[in-house]
């Protein structure tokens, strides 16, 4: 009786492990929405710890950037071995529970079935059924991952195209000051009209791709001084300055671009359990930019001849009122991704402390 209970328990445990594995693969590769998965989170957290050890003693950013460039690809590369291993263990338990002894033989039969090698099998119908099911799961996992990679790299390519083009408008690293001042010098601020729709669409795609294809968050740009996070900050600051500070006709497209941007960053932050106030409002909630920094930028625009609103104090409050919507999440994402230094974003981001996927819901992810 006790032996039969043990067999049933081990079979159910093996079945549960296979279920968790399939659920993890579906959430990661098939489900077209953000769905954090514990198994994938464990893998990427463990890999990140190893990369942190490797980066100890590397003082310059470019050296750390070269190391971190491998982080997301290595994590993706290890996904399939992780899923195959847990599947193998699950079916090994079920094989043992259904009569294949000893453990080494149960392991051999499970591995032979999973990898479709066929050199070991059981003697009864239940063993044949388990072998067929395991082989099918193994083939499905391989096929799904093969189909997943082109989708991921296509989204990465589209993201980086806009980030690279921003260097033309905003320098490297990009800044709102550079975007606005170059536009003013070259052809007037009207040349920003196409900027708003371009980046509104970019933010919409970012929100979808960087939550459903979460490893994309950690894919670094081809150039060490570029980052999708700092590019987001520059685009949002440009819209916030245009709406609050520049003496220009009201552009609803700029406001929509800004809203699209901070909603996108918030969705990504939600996926990584970043704590922020969704109802933040200035001055009750402070921002990381102080008024002295804003005044210095205002003076620079004034010297360049950029048309500015006369009431500087009101312009500052309006800018802070826009910035408070994305300030906390922007800095947190700079920390999470270890973004290169850029003005008004990563240059004031909190020091990296703990991988956010290990933090509990509602906890801070950086100190």
Image (cartoon, rainbow, N blue to C red):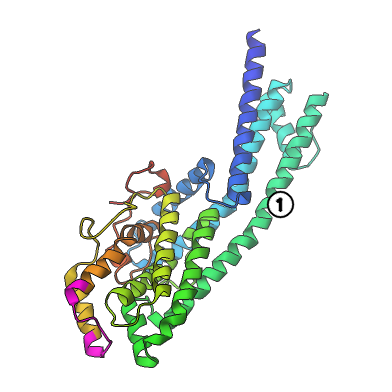
Please tell me which residue lies in front, 253 or 7: 253
- Is residue 118 located in the magenta-colored stretch of the structure? no
Left or right: where does residue 214 sit relative to residue 320? right
Residue 112 visible in the snapshot: no
* For residue 33, above or below residue 287: above
- Residue 119 placement (x, y as % from top left): 81, 37
Does the magenta run of residues contain 306?
Answer: yes
Identify which residue is drawn at 38% across, 43% down.
359
Q: Is residue 176 above or below residue 345?
A: below
Circle 1 Cα neighbour tier, 10 Å, few/some/many (<14 / 14–19 / ≥20) = few
- Image location of residue 112, percent across then percent down: 75, 38
Quarter where residue 240 is shown: bottom left
Residue lying furthest bottom: 186
- Name above or below for residue 132 compared with residue 182: above
Q: Quadrant of residue 59?
A: bottom left
- The mark tally for this picture is 1
Q: Residue 274: x and y, percent? A: 37, 50
Quarter of the picture containing the N terminus is top right
Say left or right for 315 vs 5: left
Left or right for 344, reference 34: left
Residue ID at (64%, 34%): 18
Instruction: State the image coordinates of residue 161 (x, y, percent, origin top left).
Output: 52, 74
Identify the residue shown where x is 38% and y is 64%: 339
Label 1: which secondary element: helix
Q: Which residue bears the numbered disc 1?
A: 143
Is residue 258 in sight in this rendering?
Answer: yes
Q: Is residue 102 left or right of residue 124?
A: left
Q: Which residues are magenta?
A: 302-314
Please state which of residues 332 and 327 is positioned toward the viewer in this rendering: 327
């Amino acid at each position: 009786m006790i032996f039969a209970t043990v067999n049933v328990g081990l079979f159910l445990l093996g079945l549960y492990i296979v279920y968790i594995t399939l659920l993890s693969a579906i959430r990661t590769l098939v489900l077209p929405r953000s769905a954090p998965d514990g198994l994938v989170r464990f893998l990427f957290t463990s890999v990140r710890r190893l990369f942190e050890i490797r980066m100890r003693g590397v003082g310059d950013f470019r050296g750390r950037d070269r190391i971190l460039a491998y982080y997301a690809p290595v994590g993706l590369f290890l996904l399939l071995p992780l899923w195959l291993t847990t599947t193998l263990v699950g079916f090994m338990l079920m094989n043992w529970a259904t009569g294949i002894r000893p453990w080494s033989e149960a392991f051999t039969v499970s591995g032979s079935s999973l990898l479709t090698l066929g050199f070991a099998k059981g003697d009864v119908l239940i063993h044949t059924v388990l072998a067929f099911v395991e082989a099918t799961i193994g083939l499905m996992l391989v096929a799904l991952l093969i189909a997943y990679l082109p989708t991921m790299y296509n989204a990465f390519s589209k993201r980086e195209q806009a980030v690279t083009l921003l260097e033309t408008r905003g320098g490297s690293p990009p800044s709102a000051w550079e975007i606005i001042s170059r536009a003013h010098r070259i052809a007037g601020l009207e040349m920003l009209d196409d900027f708003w729709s371009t980046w509104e669409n970019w933010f919409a795609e970012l929100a979808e791709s960087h939550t459903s294809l979460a490893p994309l968050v950690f894919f670094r740009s081809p150039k060490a001084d570029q980052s999708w996070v700092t590019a987001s900050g520059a685009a949002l600051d440009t819209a916030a300055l245009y709406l609050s500070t520049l003496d220009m006709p009201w552009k609803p497209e700029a406001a929509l671009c800004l809203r699209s941007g901070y909603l996108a960053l918030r969705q990504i932050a939600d996926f990584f359990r970043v704590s922020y106030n969704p109802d933040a409002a200035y001055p009750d909630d402070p921002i990381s930019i102080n008024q002295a920094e804003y005044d210095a930028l205002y003076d620079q625009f004034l010297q360049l001849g950029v048309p500015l609103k006369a009431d500087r104090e009101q312009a500052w409050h309006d800018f802070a009122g826009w910035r408070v919507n994305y300030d906390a999440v922007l800095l947190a994402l700079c920390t999470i991704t270890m973004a290169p230094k850029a003005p008004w974003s990563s240059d004031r981001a909190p020091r990296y402390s703990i991988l956010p996927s290990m933090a509990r819901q509602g906890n801070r992810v950086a100190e």
